[in-house]
Image (cartoon, rainbow, N blue to C red):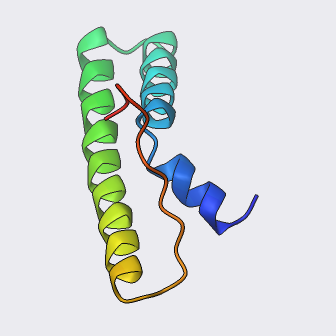
Amino acid sequence: MDKDDIIRKLTSRKFWAAVCSFGGLIIVAIGHSESEAAQVTAIIMAGASVLAYILGEGLIDAAREGADVWVEEAEEGEE
């Protein structure tokens, strides 16, 4: 797995949805309420949104400056 693969994973909404689902289920499984699980899930998604934005803007800026950067276009319905 190279740097591009890692960046692609970190900017994937499907990846972060899976992470949130796993985190929420673990929280409920260890005895916390669904309300607490929802709060943790919301925090994870907020952090993921910020991370994806920062990485995406960094890639766009690098491409604009002429760096050799590969940017994957979103598939239809994946935005």
Task: List the single residue furthest toward the right.
Answer: 1
Q: Looking at the rendering, in which quadrant would you find the N terminus?
A: bottom right
Task: Specify the quadrant of the image occupied by residue 62.
Answer: bottom left
Horizontal and vertical percent position of residue 74:
40, 42
Work out whether 63 lies above or below 70. below
Task: Find residue 38 and report its horizontal and vertical position in percent.
Answer: 27, 20
Q: Count of labels shown? A: 0
Residue in the image at 37% along x and 30% along y: 78
Q: Which of these two is toward me, 3 or 51?
A: 3
Residue 49 screen position, x and y as percent = 28, 47
Image-quadrant location for residue 36: top left
Image-based side of 78 in relation to 30, left or right: left
Residue 8 versus residue 23: which sits nearer the camera? 8
Residue 45 sits in quarter: top left
Which one is in front, 35 or 32? 35
Quadrant where the C terminus is found in the figure? top left
**Residue ID at (48%, 86%):** 67
Residue 2 sits above or below residue 68 on the image? above
Against 28, residue 74 (above or below) is below
Seen in the picture, residue 17 relative to 69 is either above or below; the reply is above
Residue at x 30% of width, y 49% of height = 47
Q: Residue at x 35, y 73 (%)?
A: 58
